[in-house]
Structure formats: structure tokens, C-alpha cells
Image (cartoon, rainbow, N blue to C red):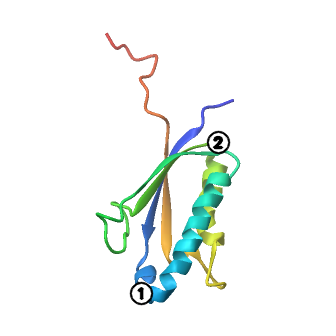
């Protein structure tokens, strides 16, 4: 079996979220929490941790620095794609999807280790 992919899911909140009346933002947060739970439940995803930067990042995030991050070991690229697709399939307000209010980008690599073929002495 091959080593899992180390994936950093970078997530940003879009301007559409900030345009909502305060009375409606809870609906988006509930959908976002549901998406995170669905990501953790995906077969082949082992969430290692997450970081929320909402105390130091205020307003929409169009790229780095992102609003929040999830670090996970993921079985393969198809599973990474399935995790990202949750933004398209998680419903908000019944006729919108989460991607109207938030975005995701996956950075794929491997765990940082000293390779055995690299001389260290």
C-alpha cells in the first residue's frame, strides 16, 4: 500500500457570506460545520488537525492567508477531489451550495521527513 498524501485544505470565506444579514449567517456556519464533518467521515481521509484564523483574518479571503485550514492524510487524489467537491454538494438555504459562500484549495504533498537516500553526517 502506498503512503497517503499529506493534504492541506485551505479554505476562505467569500464576500457573499459577508453580504448576508446577520440573521442568516448561522445557516452558512451550520452548512460549513456539516461539510467539515462530512470531510472527516470520507473513507480515506484521516484529519490530523485544523486551524481557524478568524481572530487575525477579518473579511473575505481570496487566497493566502486563508481563513481556515484542515491538515489530513488522504488515500489518493480522487479522495482529495471528493473532499473539495463537498463545497459543491453541501446545500445552503435549500437552493445554494456552500461554494457560494466559501472556497477551498488543496495543497498536496507528503509528510516532511529526511529521505533515507540523503546523507546526514
Residue 109 x/y as whole percent = 49, 41
Would residue 115 be found to the left or right of residue 58 on screen? Answer: right
Q: Secondary structure at mark 1?
A: helix
Q: Quadrant of the C terminus?
A: top left
Q: Nearer the viewer, residue 105 or 39?
A: 39
For discs 1 and 2, the disc positioned in front in the rendered view: 1
Q: Secondary structure at mark 2?
A: loop
Left or right: 63 with respect to 27?
Answer: left
Q: Which residue is depicted at the point 67% across and 53% down? A: 41
Say few, some or many: other residues with alpha carbon within 10 Å of mark 2 (under 14 / 14 to 19 / 20 or more).
some
Q: Is residue 40 above or below residue 76?
A: below
Whether residues under marks 1 and 2 lie with C-beta atoms below 8 angstroms apart, the answer is no
Tell me if mark 1 has few (under 14), some (14-19) or many (20+) residues whose alpha carbon lies within 10 angstroms of its own.
few
Q: Residue at x 60, y 32 (%)?
A: 3
Point out residue 76 in the picture as x, y percentages from the top left corner: 64, 44
The residue shown at (33%, 60%) is 65
Write the residue at 40% across / 17% down.
118
Query: Which quadrant: the N terminus?
Result: top right
Is residue 51 among the parts visible in the rendering?
yes
Depth check, front residue: 115 or 89? 89
Which of the 4 quarters of the picture holds residue 17? bottom left
The image quadrant that residue 119 belongs to is top left
Instruction: Report the side of 45 relative to 7 (left or right).
Output: right
Marks 1 and 2, the one that precedes in the sequence: 1
The residue pinned by badge 2 equals: 75
Frontmost residue, 83 versus 77: 83
Label 1, on which residue?
Answer: 19
Look at the picture and state if 75 lies above or below 29: above
- The percent position of residue 44, horizontal first and vertical second, equals 67, 45
Q: Give the CA separation, mark 1 to mark 2.
A: 37 Å
Q: Which residue occupies the extreme top position in the image?
A: 121
Quadrant in the rendering for residue 53: bottom left
Amino acid at each position: 500500500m502506498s503512503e497517503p498524501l499529506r493534504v492541506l485544505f485551505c479554505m476562505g470565506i467569500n464576500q457573499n457570506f459577508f453580504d448576508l444579514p446577520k440573521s442568516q449567517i448561522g445557516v452558512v456556519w451550520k452548512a460549513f460545520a456539516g461539510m467539515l464533518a462530512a470531510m472527516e467521515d470520507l473513507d480515506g481521509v484521516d484529519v490530523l488537525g485544523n486551524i481557524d484564523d478568524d481572530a487575525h483574518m477579518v473579511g473575505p479571503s481570496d487566497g493566502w492567508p486563508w481563513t481556515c485550514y484542515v491538515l489530513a492524510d488522504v488515500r489518493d487524489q480522487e479522495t482529495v477531489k471528493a473532499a473539495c467537491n463537498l463545497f459543491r454538494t453541501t446545500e445552503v438555504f435549500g437552493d445554494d451550495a456552500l461554494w457560494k459562500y466559501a472556497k477551498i484549495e488543496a495543497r498536496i504533498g507528503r509528510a516532511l521527513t529526511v529521505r533515507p537516500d540523503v546523507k546526514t553526517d
